[in-house]
Amino acid sequence: MKVLLVGVGGVGEAIAAIAKPRQWLEQMVLADYNLKRAEEVQKKLGDATRFLVEFVDANKQENIEALAKKYNVDLIMNAVDPIFNPQIFDAAYAVGAKYMDMAMTLSSPHPSDPFHKPGVKLGDYQFAKAKDWEGKGLLALVGIGVEPGMADVFARYAQDYLFDEIEEIGIRDGANLVIDGYEFAPSFSIWTTIEECLNPPIIWEQDKGWFTTAPFSEPEVFDFPGGIGKVEVVNVEHEEVLLVPRWVKTKRVTFKYGLGDQFIGVLKTLHALGLDKKEKINVKGVQVSPRDVVAACLPDPAHLGDKMHGKTCAGTWVKGIKDGQPREVYLYQVADNQECMQAWGCQAVVAQTAFSAVIAMDLIEHGIWNGAGVLGPEAFDPLPFMDRMADYGFPYGIKEMTKSAVIAS
């Protein structure tokens, strides 16, 4: 397989590092706006023959198309902030390459009632073009990171193998990670973090469809495995809520993230000051996006690994009926930062985000996952994916929670 990797930040580097030992990967083009960053990753990988470096402006569809044609790639892997998704998605369609991303096209709040009604939903742009992709016989696999991605695979597995009837699917994410030397240092892209945390969270219910609520709503305490323990989680906008109901039969879908009071406080302050805005403003004759300024002021998550300690857990909580009896389970993956640094030279959050994309490439290359159109991870057989997780260094676990599950805060 020949892959054009658009974006060589923390997650892009992790994708390349995890894919490097796999013989099915013929070539990967490390394309980034920051050419020095791409060269840094190439040097760390130590294989300039299979991992090539190119400049790309992800805001220009023609740049992406030119690189895809130059290297005759089979797949374009989108590993940049989702603001660039339309251009990369459309470039793949134009050149006839398969497409994958880890976050779907962005949403826009409802103009008059944002905390009750959705406006433009995550992925609407992509799903609107599904028939075009089907007609061309091309696959766009959207939302194939860890969340969304692995969590969606778990939802499909729960439907197919663990439950007769599902009442609720809730993605639950928590960690006990500590970053030395920083009062505030997100372990993931702050651009994306602001987007998903300050937008109105979306919920799906069988009788109501998709609707929104206020940011950080419905707090609950969830007991995470792997020694992480009880963490308060809150509603956050996320792709799983848009993907799961399309392929998995359930009555309710939510996404809740363990942010912590300090993190939520910083996000609320950024919003109050208008520093979360994407639109450019005039600063002494220079047009800048406030959110880009915030991102530039914070440390690069790709270079925080040696200062991080602890674990992060991603997973899917499912409540329903099996053999006439109530059942609750949590399917999860725990990534230890020290282990990730030793194995791939990448911190836990970006490594955990990256591995699902690499497994999906493996499955697509070997014809195990195939299809045409715009499809989420739930559209495919979950077993081949889950069977590969341990081999790729990210084994999953299943925690039975039937007697004691979620404790209201």
Image (cartoon, rainbow, N blue to C red):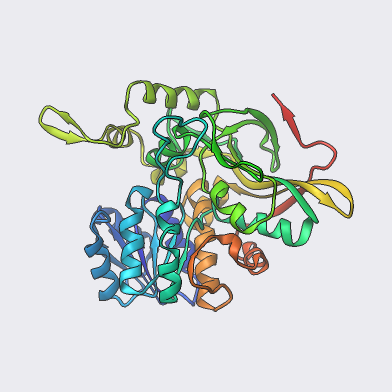
Which of the two residues, 345 or 210, is positioned nearer the viewer here?
A: 210
Q: Position of residue 30 (x, y in %)?
A: 33, 63
Q: Give the residue drawn at x 32%, y 28%.
A: 275
Query: Position of 207 compared to 301: left or right?
Result: right
Q: Position of residue 313 (x, y in %)?
A: 62, 44
Q: Is residue 301 visible?
A: yes
Q: Position of residue 2 (x, y in %)?
A: 39, 75
> Number of marks in the image?
0
Q: Position of residue 59 (x, y in %)?
A: 25, 54
Q: Give the residue drawn at x 53%, y 66%.
A: 360
Q: Specify the quadrant of the image occupied by residue 274.
A: top left
Which of the two residues, 113 or 395, is positioned nearer the viewer here?
A: 113
Quick one: quadrant of the N terminus? bottom left
Q: Specify the quadrant of the image occupied by residue 128.
A: bottom left
Query: Height in image: 26 above or below 177?
Result: below
Q: Give the residue drawn at x 43%, y 27%.
A: 267
Quick one: quadrant of the C terminus? top right
Query: Position of 404 compared to 4: left or right?
Result: right
Q: Specify the quadrant of the image occupied by residue 226.
A: top right
Q: Give the residue drawn at x 26%, y 68%.
A: 65
Query: Position of 60 compared to 263: left or right?
Result: left
